[in-house]
Image: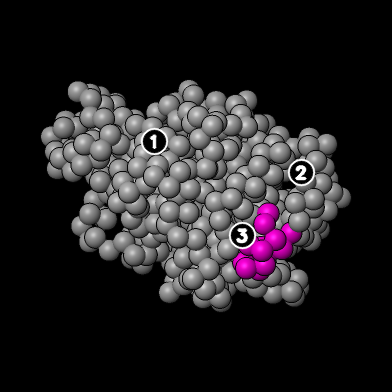
Amino acid sequence: MPDLTVAPAAGIATPESTPGGLPLSLLRRFDVPGPRYTSYPTADRFVEAFGPADLEQALRQRADGACVGARTPLSLYVHIPFCESLCYYCACNKVITKHHDRAAEYLLALRAEIALYAKVLGAPQPVSQLHLGGGSPTFLSDAELEGLMAELNDAFRLTPNAEVSIEVDPRTVTAERLAAFRRMGFNRLSFGVQDFDPEVQKAVHRVQSFESVRDLILASRALGYESINTDLIYGLPKQTPASFAHTVAQVAELRPDRIALYAYAHLPQRFKPQRRIEAAMLPPPGDRVAMLSGAIAGFMGHGYSYIGMDHFALADDALAAAKRQGRLHRNFQGYSTQPDCDLIGLGVSAIGRMGATYSQNAKTLPEYYDAIRHGQLPTVRGLALTRDDLLRRAVIMALMCQGRVEFESIELAYLVNFRDYFRAELGDLATFAAEGLVTVEPGALQVTASGWFVVRAIAMVFDKHLQADKVRERFSRII
């Protein structure tokens, strides 16, 4: 990983450059739409030809110990789609409703889906990572969450040091609810903050005070949660570099263990709620760059390690330690300390990874419920990875996680000559190398400190699927 030290005096970027000295004109040149690479191939490459039977085959291979990773503990993701209120920026799969009784039918379907997995896998599989996301998992009542956790504990076996996390909408919880979550076995929390500026909150229809979030984080500390994360978004309507710098300072004051900083992707043609946001209210590209570089400078100035692209962590956090030790990984939730492992996605639209396959559940509740009623896994699309996919995934994940690719490690694992196999890609990297964004060494690729701002663009060079069709408008911009 490149040294991403930013001088504290840099503060917010100047109009000409980022804190790392990268000219904004160059950054804008490489600020193109591109994948976030939480997987490779990316989810838009999944095909409907991959269905429940294909996933069942991959599950049986794991149960029989016949696939890579079969002896590694599982990761579980459970999607709870319900929210009481619509956030205009949101691109998640969600159902907006104030009728909490709708959760009952969904939880019954989840129970049936869990049972389908348990039937194929046989004996309870060990799980080292469990994450509830949404939507808003805290839409569920404490009794409903407790019942769901009981179902999961019956079907799977949480390892002693398992990471058990839940996404929290601060508007839906109290200190008492946080205590109940702790008793259920949750040891990690992720608070959706996005921005503390009142005008920005009104513009995106998500109003919550700094004081309310502060009190919840203090309560979480007292309850002994092992890790607390906050999510932020830059590029929202009415944000300015100055206003976002204030939010960064406020978040730093709260001292969460981890911070996820995402770029808002305005894609109203794909996500209907975003049509309520006027494009004229969005910050211009130069301001977005200033927000990102200012946030990096601000958080690092407060003692956070820049993990990469969209994550920060305190120096004593496990994520920071994994980065220092070269053990960083990336999955559908972002950067992780968990080694590459099979992932079971439960619930509507959830994505899983099993062996050399990816799978995704039905995206609508009617379609999801129909599959469950027919006693089959609700898989509607997926992908069986080729040898080339696996090889390119290893290269892309090394770039995204470590900022470095050692040719020899790839050659030993996949029995190729790196320079011969990627001759065209190494040629395409010449543009990045000429601008000081990547260094091509005799036996390795190294992303520079400046190159880390556009590491997604560097990784895209190795994306064979993306290079083949050049259609990128469906992705968010890199900055």
Query: The disc labelled 1 sits on which kind of residue?
Result: Gly
Find residue 276 and report its horizontal and vertical position in percent.
Answer: 56, 75
Q: Residue at x 55, y 51 (%)?
A: 241
Residue 204 shown left or right of residue 450 in the figure: right
Q: Nearer the viewer, residue 307 or 462?
A: 307
Callout 3–callout 1 Cβ contact below 8 Å: no
Task: Please report whichever mark, 3 or 1, sits nearer to the chain's N-terminal start.
Answer: 1
Q: Counting other residues with Cα less than 10 Å from the Cα at mark 3, is it few (<14), some (14-19), or many (20 or more)? A: many
Q: Which mark is residue 21?
A: 1
Residue 73 shown left or right of residue 224 in the figure: left
Q: Secondary structure at mark 1?
A: loop
Residue 220 shown left or right of residue 327 in the figure: right
Q: Residue at x 74, y 74 (%)?
A: 98
Region rendered in magenta = 196-208
In space, the residues marked 1 and 2 are separated at their CA atoms by 35 Å
Q: Residue at x 25, y 38 (%)?
A: 435
Residue 476 shown left or right of residue 318 in the figure: left
Residue at mark 2: 217
Q: Secondary structure at mark 3?
A: strand
In space, the residues marked 3 and 1 are separated at their CA atoms by 38 Å
Q: Name the front one of labels 3 and 1.
A: 1
Vertical placement of residue 216 versus 346, above or below: above
Task: Please report whichever mark, 1 or 2, sits nearer to the chain's N-terminal start.
Answer: 1
Queried whether the magenta region covers residue 201, the answer comes back as yes
Query: The disc labelled 3 sits on which kind of residue?
Result: Gly
Task: Please report whichever mark, 3 or 2, sits nearer to the chain's N-terminal start.
Answer: 3
Q: Counting other residues with Cα less than 10 Å from the Cα at mark 1, is it few (<14), some (14-19), or many (20 or more)? A: some
Residue at mark 3: 134
Kindly indicate the quadrant of the structure image that contains residue 8: top right
Callout 1–callout 2 Cβ contact below 8 Å: no
In space, the residues marked 3 and 2 are separated at their CA atoms by 20 Å
Q: Nearer the viewer, residue 164 or 174?
A: 174
